[in-house]
Amino acid sequence: MSEKVFISYSHQEGEWVTDRLEPVLTASGVEVLIDTKRFRAGYAVIGEMDATQEAADRSVLVLSPAYLKSDYCCHEMKRAIARDPKLQAGRTLTVVRGDVAVPDELAKSLYIDLIDDGNPKPWGLLLDGCQGDLGTAAPAWLEARDQVRRFLERGDSVNFLITGNPAWRKLLDHLRDTVVPDLRDVDLDAGRTAHRRALVETILEVIGSPQAVADGDDLVVLDRSLSSRSRTWLAFLHFDQAAYLEKPRVKFFAALRDLIMTQKKLVALFHSRRPFADLLPRDHPLSHVDVKTVKLSGHP
């Protein structure tokens, strides 16, 4: 089972916590318990704080000047220390996010300096303490996330190029949860996508327009369905398979190019382990698509 980690923080650090700390922990396999997702309306705040913290295996205390001035935060800090007063069980992890004097009760432990969160070593200490694993350095994961997010929000198609075993699926899940809720997966490794008509039917199904299509009419139906929408986001997983596809799919990719480049109705994310340009011959329809490359490498 995954570790349950309670995050205690001042809302002045809320943007950093929800945009960087929480996504990293979640992607590493940790179950994050946080007020924005766990507290219930209509219940006493202190009671919700205590119940949520009690359900956690560990507490991550995000110390900042505002944190130490907050009665609520200090209450959570005292409860965390009380669960492991000698700091020998690793149940309290201290993250420093500002120029603060670490309280004496916590000073005996190794605190984690994330004032500069571009340094991978403190992130590594935090993930080790929470028993999480991103498969890559946290700053690299966040940088790839930020690049993919920026391109997709801008309407640019992306080649999400993966090496090793970083938590790339969790990155896509995070983007769905935050900025691109309509991003849908089409897995080219799946047997159901082996033939063009079945591939088109899969796309129609994942965008919420399931229907059977006849051979020869499939691309007409696909174009009509996607053209009628304001915009569609599709993640083509394991796009490396495109190098081995049957010839009838050439017209399928020509249809994709038209939807991406001409009609501006489709934004595609091509997940692969080889560069997009290396997968396609020069005369391939998709070789003329403007695709931004974002790389994410796992640990050596």
Image (spheres, rainbow, N blue to C red):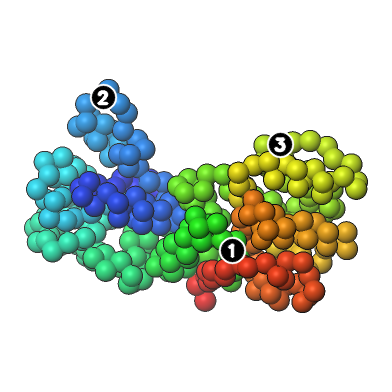
Q: Nearer the viewer, mark 2 or mark 3?
A: 3
**Precedes in sequence: disc 2 or disc 1:** 2
Element type at mark 1: strand
Tags 1 and 3 in contact by the CB under 8 Å rule?
A: no
Query: What residue type is disc 1 on?
Result: Val
Is residue 234 in sight in this rendering? no
Residue indicated by mark 1: 158
- The location of residue 238, given as percent across then percent down, is 69, 61
Element type at mark 2: loop
Q: What residue is at 35 percent from the left and 35 percent from the top?
A: 38
Q: What residue is at 83 percent from the left and 62 percent from the top?
A: 250
Q: Nearer the viewer, residue 37 or 247?
A: 247
Q: State the residue lying farthest toward the top.
A: 42
**Precedes in sequence: disc 2 or disc 3:** 2
**Precedes in sequence: disc 1 or disc 3:** 1
Q: Residues within 10 Å of mark 3 (few under 14, many from 20)?
A: few
Q: Is residue 4 left or right of residue 168?
A: left
- The location of residue 70, given as percent across then percent down, is 12, 44
Residue indicated by mark 3: 209
